[in-house]
Image (spheres, rainbow, N blue to C red):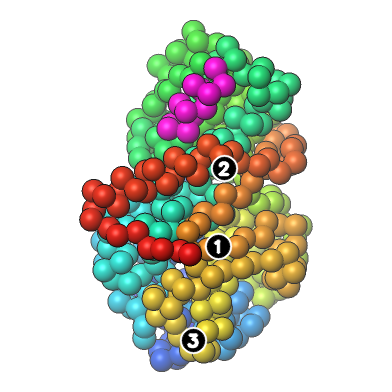
Amino acid sequence: MNIKKLAVAGLGAVAALSGLVPTEALAQNEQFIPMLVYRTGPYAPSGIPVANGFRDYYTLVNNRDGGINGVKIAFEECETQYNTKLGVECYEKLKNSGPTGASLVNPYSTGITYQLIPKASVDKVPILSMGYGQTAAADGRVFEWVFNFPTTYWSQASAFVRYVAQQEGGLDKLKGKKIAHVHHNSAYGKEANPTLEALSKKYGFKLTLLAVDHPGQEQKATWLQVRRLRPDWIFMSGWGVMNQVAIKEAAAIQFKMDHFVGNWWSGSDADVVPAASAAAGYKSATFHGAGDQYQIHKEIIKYVYNGNYAKAKENNLGEVLYNRGLVNAMFGVEAIRTAMSKYGNKPMTGEQVRWGLENLNVTDARLAELGMKGFTRPVQVSCADHETGGPIIIQQWNGKEWNMVSDWIPTMRDVVRPMIERTAAEYAKENNIQPRSCT
């Protein structure tokens, strides 16, 4: 089914009642954004709410605002099943759609992101890998076309270690502690390892890396190792069904759930609900709010679902990963709006949107205007810093809902940024890239 033309008014009502349906659009006055999704396969429990969040935000902007400064958003979903090969095929299929081609691409897979990075500068399509992908892309001098704000896996890992230190009484109390990293055996799952290894040497904690093979439905051996190791803390970089299984296994060996912290892809409703009360106490990192109490949700109910709250909830309104889709879509839309401030209110090219991403400044005041006051943190991107090194906050599942149980935790920029710059420099050398001057 061809669903590219989704920019006209009335999409909200259609989407609310029956999902995505092809419609006619004003082809010469639309901003095309491809959507790489995974609504099927073992990662569908995570992929569906993310895709719904994107879809509903774009629909909200069209129905409430008439588009971005009068330019309607058109989008098309392409099913990747979280498979790198399928993801690249989806990108190739959609990159030239719309009057100006794809505005930007959100791969929603570290593996797909890695494959698209060399294509971005050739195709002139910027990559927004929000909080995932290749961490070294935070150095905008080398990775001109890749953006991973508001924070990265390395920064998140450093903030997790800082959080553990807070709970243990200080960074000096980490010496001798045992921390296990249970991670998806993929490029994504391994991303945090360099930071954890560097910090284990710096602070003296004993780190154990435990890889879980795709898709993660069988983890008995991993959790037998955990039971023998008896770590003080567990950090998890999981995705999809892996998270559900890990939480159930941790409960089965009676691991202390309040010492089990997932990364921001291991802290969704789909991860904890299957374990029922056994998941109570489990924690995860995040960089935005949970629940549907924010103004943005009220506006989505009104403009996308015609006041039908029950239908909105069926489409994951307020769930953690739905909310992440909203935040991600908002950043992309605001980057396009930023580009229009320089190039005019018309469909932007990928090159123009790249400029918008690099000059993005989402303030507290702007978040309030968008109905996202208190929902996420301000972001200001620059030429050299495509990450911004934003802090994380820890949420905890109480058996029914997520609650924030920490203040915003700063990342260890003094440790992470030099690692990023070294790795980016190595990438530049290997790929014959002359880093830009951002002075």
Residue 99 placement (x, y as % from top left)? 36, 86
Q: Amino acid at mark 2?
A: Arg
Q: Is residue 432 above or below residue 156?
A: below
Provide the residue designation for mark 2. 413
Can residue 178 be seen here? The reply is yes
Above or below residue 75? Residue 53 is above
Three-letter code, disc 1 = Val
The disc, 2 or 1, on the residue closer to the chain's N-terminal end is 1
Q: Quadrant of residue 248?
A: top right
| Disc 1: which residue | 381
Q: Residue at coordinates 58% horizontally, 86% vertically from top-left?
A: 69
Q: Is residue 391 above or below residue 359?
A: above
Which region shows up in magenta?
193-204
Residue where numbered disc 3 is placed? 343
Query: Tag 3: Cα neighbours inside 10 Å, few (<14), some, or many (≥20)?
Result: some
The crowd level at tag 1 (other Cα within 10 Å; few <14, some 14-19, many 20+) is many
- Out of 52 and 204, give the one closest to the viewer: 204
